[in-house]
Amino acid sequence: MNLKHSDFDVGETMKKGKRIFFVLTIAILTTIQLVAVPVWAATSSDLKKQKEELQKQQSQTQDAYDSASDAAQEIADEQTELGEQIDDTNDQLVGLIADISLIEDEIADKEAEIEVTQAAYDEAKAQEEKLYQEMCARIKYMYEKGETTYVEILMSATSFSDFTTKAEYVEQLYEYDRQQLEAYVEVQLEKATYKVQLEDEKGELETTKEELAQEQELLQKTLNEYKLAYADYETQLANARAQAATYKEQLKAQTSQIASLDSEIKAKEAEEEAARKAAEEAAKKAAQESANASSGSDSTSSSSSSTPSSSSGKTYSPAGEATGDNIAAYACQFVGNPYVFGGTSLTDGCDCSGFVYSVYKAFGITVPRTSYALNSAGTGVAYEDARPGDVIVYAGHCAIYLGNGRIVHASSEKTGIKYGYATYRTITSVRRFV
């Protein structure tokens, strides 16, 4: 954007630009009402009511932000074409600053998680080595004493009394060896689990850093345009950063509270489901015992279901009609396929936005190719109103919503396309295209 101050009324444009900042700032700050959600619920229904209330607050925040943006747009409509370009640049700047700040926070959180996982892995590895050395030391001790097997220990008895004593010793020795072996196997499994977790977390971290680099590159480009657009660049930039910080913190807090309620709801529902199944099992057992007592047992059972045989090559169903449910179902077929930065192939590899782009393309729908552009495309909806097939947008990342808090997305080079939870990162927007 090559702009000269002589081409337009600088004073008037600055006044109107500041009005936009004022409207946005007031609208955002007046919506910060993050009330702590009391954990008093006894059932999953109660927890869901709390979650609905929090989601309403989040929806109000998003509505207020949208209203502020609408107000800014009304002012921009009164300006010249150049003034509208300046306002667009300002909106983009605020969004980019917020996104970059969110990604930097997520990188810091992921690095902290990796430190914890690394420590757990190192501890498991050290424990494995300790148990191994202890077993080697015992085997060496028995070999040096000439007692290499339990049988040899028993055969070395010189009397019945000695045989009884050695039998007790062998029994204790066997129990000790069994416990040591079980502990060794358990710590090996624990170490292997931590190793996989560590590799997954490192893979996600690398992908997030790539997303950050993309956002920073776009920010620098926008800043260069911004310097040309505003005479008081530093003041306007400070205002943009303040607005972005407010918006970011509000979204983080609301997403965190919703995620916490989701966990409580899942736990409560699992508890209620377990109680229901236990009651059903008890009733079924009582009915079976009653039937056995009266007419004998007849436990013949059959199953009409069949397990489809897996073919040597993976096949995919066609896209079908462009509905949200069909889009979600179609996207799930590609779980397990690779992640490739910059790719758009659902089979050979794609990144997060390439995944969303190609899934929608299969239905004849064109969506933006980057997560940043997706953040303002389509129709924005509140998270509480999200439906299968909607696009969940994060800072530098995106996914396809499946319903019930679940998503499918191209996660990282390590994990590829996989399932996940929608609130695993701070949600910046939910977009609908069908």
Image (spheres, helix red, strand yellow):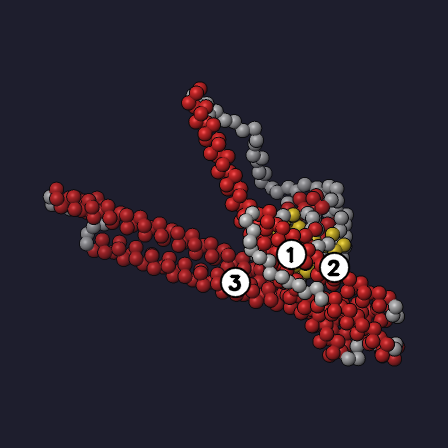
Label 3 CA crowd tier, 10 Å (few <14, some 14–19, many 20+): some
Q: Secondary structure at mark 2?
A: helix
The span from disc 1 to disc 3 (Cα, nearest Å) is: 27 Å
List the residue tagged with mark 3: 113
Label 1 or label 3, whichever comes before in sequence order: 1
List the residue tagged with mark 2: 63
Q: Identity of the amino acid at label 1?
A: Leu
Label 2 CA crowd tier, 10 Å (few <14, some 14–19, many 20+): some
Residue at the limit of the structure toward the left, as seen here: 159
Measuring from the top left, give residue 145's x and y in whole percent.
19, 54
Left or right relative to 413: residue 9: right
At 56% from the left and 64% from the top, the residue drawn is: 109
Q: Identity of the amino acid at label 2?
A: Asp
**Foreground residue among 127 and 420:** 420
Q: Quadrant of the N terminus?
A: bottom right
At 64% from the left and 41% from the top, the residue drawn is: 315
The label shown at residue 327 is: none
Q: Secondary structure at mark 3?
A: helix
The label shown at residue 54 is: 1
Label 2 or label 3, whichever comes before in sequence order: 2
Measuring from the top left, give residue 409's x and y in whole percent.
64, 53
Q: Are marks 1 and 3 in contact (CB under 8 Å)?
A: no
Left or right relative to 254: residue 92: right
Q: Secondary structure at mark 1?
A: helix
Measuring from the top left, give residue 328's x and y in whole percent.
67, 46
**Foreground residue among 226 and 20:** 20
